[in-house]
Amino acid sequence: MSKTKRIIAAVTAAIITATSASLMSVFADNGEVKKADSITATKADNTKSSLQEYADDISTYMMENSIAGDAFVHDNKIVVTYSAHEDKIKAYIMEKGIDESIVVYEKGHNVGVIIDDKTDAEKPNEENTTDKDGILQEYADDISTYMMENSIAGDAFVHDNKIVVTYSAHEDKIKAYIKEKGIDENLVFYEKGRNQEDITDDEKEAALKEYAADISNFMIKSDIAGDAFVHDGKVVVTFSAYEDKIKAYVKEKGIDENLVFYEKGRNQEDITDDEKEAALKEYAADISNFMIKSDIAGDAFVHDGKVVVTFSAYEDKIKAYVKEKGIDENIVVYEKGQDQNTKGDANCDGQVDLSDAVMIMQALANPNKYGIDGTAEHHLTEQGKLNGDMNGDGLTVGDAQSIQRKLLGLDDTLTIQTPPATNSYSYESYSDLNEALIKQDSSILVDSNNYGELFNKTVSAFGNKDIDLYVPAIDGKACDLRNKEGFSNISLMTAELYNLPWIWYHCKVNNIDVDVKLAYHSVIESSELNSAKNYYEVLKVIAPDAPNPDNYAKFESYQKIYESEITIANGEKVVAMISEIANSSNVYVMFVYEGKLVSIYANKDDLSESFLSSFSLEKI
């Protein structure tokens, strides 16, 4: 607030204070509604913990929004005490998704009847009236802060059980704020200060200059060409566009429209082609910057006398911004497409990796939990669905495969035929997986006939005990699974990398994330496969064009691929193919172990000699 306005505010407050009756003693500051002594909170295991978390959340919301009251747990319910703003509290509880059946609302006295509605015998003595006093003072402080933040001269204080609001202008804004806060109008007394005609010419001039400076700063921040200055007792605003925005700002600030003169520049037809081109480029740059700041993939540029906006999502947000900036819709062309930088980013974390393929598989296998509007914390979104659609035919398991092949630099055509359909099954424990594969739980594995001959052979081999189920282990003990909220622990892919069925184990080893994948390629009847001694030799048979030590330079996804002898548990030595990912510290360590393809994916530093020498596969 300027020095001039502070002087005016001080004088106004002094005049009002001088003409007011002597102030009575102000009530105490404590306006918090107390919980009834008869109510006590009880603790009860996990349910209590969850309820207490909800109660704490509600209590914090009430405190942050200056709502007197509290929230606490009693008899396995969340008890919410309050004196006002019931609608706001209920709206917040609904927004947080808290079950209304576990919430009890206990409304206290309204501020106006804390004392006054009681009989003389019921009225407490003066030292016990802190509830009303404190709430009034809290409201007064709230109004005073609002006026200060909005450059409204005046004050708010408590006198004779009323909130006295002094001001010289903006009465409507003050009343609107009081109504918004739910404060009883009967508790508020308004005292308006001097009339405009009582203000000196110097004070008026100073106020006009402050208004002009305020409008000018707004135009600069909003990239609106023009200016605002004082001339002949008016604020003159010059501009070439965005008149509505300027007027809306003037109205929002409460500036008298009679004090403002608007002067619009040249008509559009008077502007030269070069000036039009420059204006279009400025609009395009403005929209482009907005998209960058809002994390909206796409661009904006000038072409054939138009601003062309390319985007893959959030069209409504872009159009709303164009409208807000006052840009003529007739000069804007919208082109919706898919930005290559986001293609494959199904979980919208800004990068394409294995987790995107997992997100697609989970969303398709369990849409109620992982699909759009799913219950899991990490579920598919509309943007993720668009990003994950790799070929424009809708989101399918084939898109998850395409992401995997994209990461590995593979073409879509592989040696092993793609099955008619693919699927993913999610399991939370090793025993769940064992039930499905070894005990052939038909309720878990369904419609397998559509998933191709190779998947059927693999499932039959497990059921016939031709092959055993192995799980990753460290020092002979099965690895802990990640147990991460919103994510599965184990995924069975009916056809994934190289069109083979793969089992993904998402492990946690010494607090390190490690993905271990197994494929039982031994079910394929091939003499060439039977004679293959290591991972690269198997790759030459089932996917000869896949990235390998001889051709990795053709693939941007890899920094380097090479073979190296490693030592795993029990001192066993195997020849592994190491694939170092470009622009990443993660690597794949891939090798063959007793008729299985093994792929370990983690940070290179974590896959140390010590880790590998303790790694094994254990039968369950």
Image (cartoon, grey):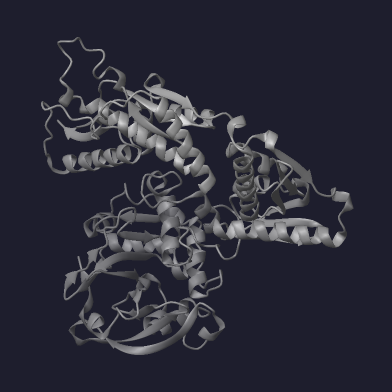
Residue 378, given in percent of the width and then of the height, sits at 38, 52
Q: Is residue 552 left or right of residue 73?
A: right
What quarter of the picture does the C terminus occupy?
A: bottom left
**Is residue 505 positioned above or below 71 on the image?**
below
Q: Residue at x 26, y 15 (%)?
A: 116
Whether residue 173 is visible to the viewer of this picture, yes or no, is yes
Residue 497, given in percent of the width and then of the height, sits at 45, 69
**Is residue 236 positioned above or below 19 on the image?**
below
Comparing 609 with 114, the one in front is 114
**Is residue 381 positioned above or below 525 on the image?**
above
Q: In which image quadrant can residue 306 be found?
A: bottom right
Q: Residue at x 25, y 12 (%)?
A: 117
Q: In which image quadrant can residue 94 be found?
A: top left
Comparing 274 with 583, the one in front is 274
Q: In which image quadrant can residue 21 be found?
A: top left
Q: Is residue 8 left or right of residue 55?
A: right
Comparing 109 with 467, the one in front is 109
The tally of labels here is 0
Residue 601, given in percent of the width and then of the height, sits at 35, 74
Residue 277, given in percent of the width and then of the height, sits at 80, 61
Comparing 324 with 223, the one in front is 223
Q: Residue at x 28, y 59 (%)?
A: 463
Whether residue 423 is visible to the viewer of this picture, yes or no, is no
